[in-house]
Image: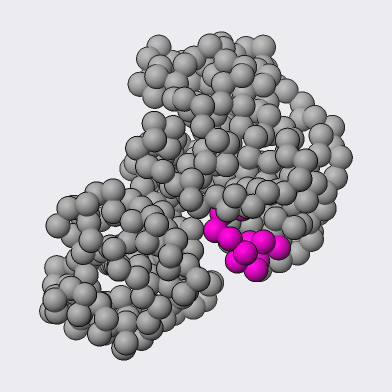
Amino acid sequence: MLAASLPSPGSLTLVRRPLPLLGPRDVLLRVEATTLCGTDLRIVTGQKTHGVAPGVILGHEIAARAWKLGVDLRPGIDARAWKLGVDLRPGIDAPAPGTQVGLAPEIACGHCVPCTAGRSNVCANMALFGTGVDGGLADVIRVPERALACITPSAREIAPPLLALAEPLSCCLRARTRLPITSTSRVLILGTGPIGLIHCALAAAAGASVMACGRPARLDPALALGASTVTASQGDELVATVREWSGGAGADVVIIAVGDPGLVPIAAQCTAIGGYISCFAGFPAGTLAQIDPNLIHYRELTISGSANATLEDYAAAVATLSTGALDLSPLITHEFPLTQVDAALDAVRSRAGLKVAVSPGRNKPTEC
């Protein structure tokens, strides 16, 4: 099979590898699409090395199709039974070959303190497809027995690049569990990359009034995905813009969707009394943010973080996409064959579009 592996930090190599060995309780999936994100780019450039295994196949936003099941597995579980847990036997049941599936990248241990507290998204012993375990930038991916629960069948067939977006959507859904967004909320999204745009779509779907702040080239997509107001203003100008938009009150919820620590104090100034700030984005290691504690105190602000997603979050994301409850198809702007993975990463690096998909079955790149 063809695979994009990382023999050392900062290098990516397209190689031919033997098909993965299939254990008695493993599953082989044929990859249909893997979308790329900024984390992939940071790994390829060597900026991120923690947890990255030498020679690993990259890619963690994965849509695939069940292909081969280990001899000890029981095939034929449909999407409804999988979702409801009907007669499922953990470690034994698997979707029937040919079933379209998403693959959650988080492989949690299930027994550490976070896992037993219902926070498997921050498992102390987390393994991840695409960093420590071979991921989706390949023709075939092996799902080991310990990760069978990561396989989530789609309720109906959808475009593979769209199904691959279940991973970033699941992370956004995770954050939403900690944010009281309703039809009367004013929501400010800081950052209009793909993640910020997904947050725009989710908040708009809840009926909230949404302001998106980001790069000028990304403001039209924000409007297309549900923002009612957009701005490229920064600093004090942004604070004044938010105050004007909100009638002087500020935003009820502010989501920081880009890893700039300088946005943290700005977010606090933009938030209404009793409001919520979500530090959703990952920030560069070692960076600090200064914030006026009196803003937190006198405005009774709640500041929270959110990382990764649980398997329940991922299942909800697959259901949301496969039922058409949320249309994120405008995010997919480019699709490349696996043989042109370098060009796909260049498109991410240059911000040529929004989400870039890599599909093993494609013969030539397309601009959607």
Q: Nearer the viewer, residue 296 or 197?
A: 197
Location of residue 238 (image quadrant): bottom left
Quarter of the image for the N terminus: give it: top right
**Residue 163, above or below 251:** above
Q: Nearer the viewer, residue 188 or 260?
A: 188
Q: Nearer the viewer, residue 68 or 163?
A: 163
**Residue 201, above or below 285:** above
Q: Which residues are magenta?
A: 346-356
**Residue 135, above or below 149:** below
Location of residue 89 in the rendering, given as x and y in whole percent from the top left corner: 46, 15
Give the side of residue 287 with respect to residue 7, left or right: left
Residue name at image x 59 percent, y 49 percent: 368
Location of residue 259 in the rendering, given as x and y in whole percent from the top left corner: 47, 70
Give the side of residue 39 with respect to residue 86, left or right: right
Location of residue 242 in the rendering, given as x and y in whole percent from the top left corner: 25, 77
Residue 319 in view in this figure: no
Give the side of residue 356 with respect to residue 362, left or right: left
Question: Is residue 348 within the magenta segment?
Answer: yes
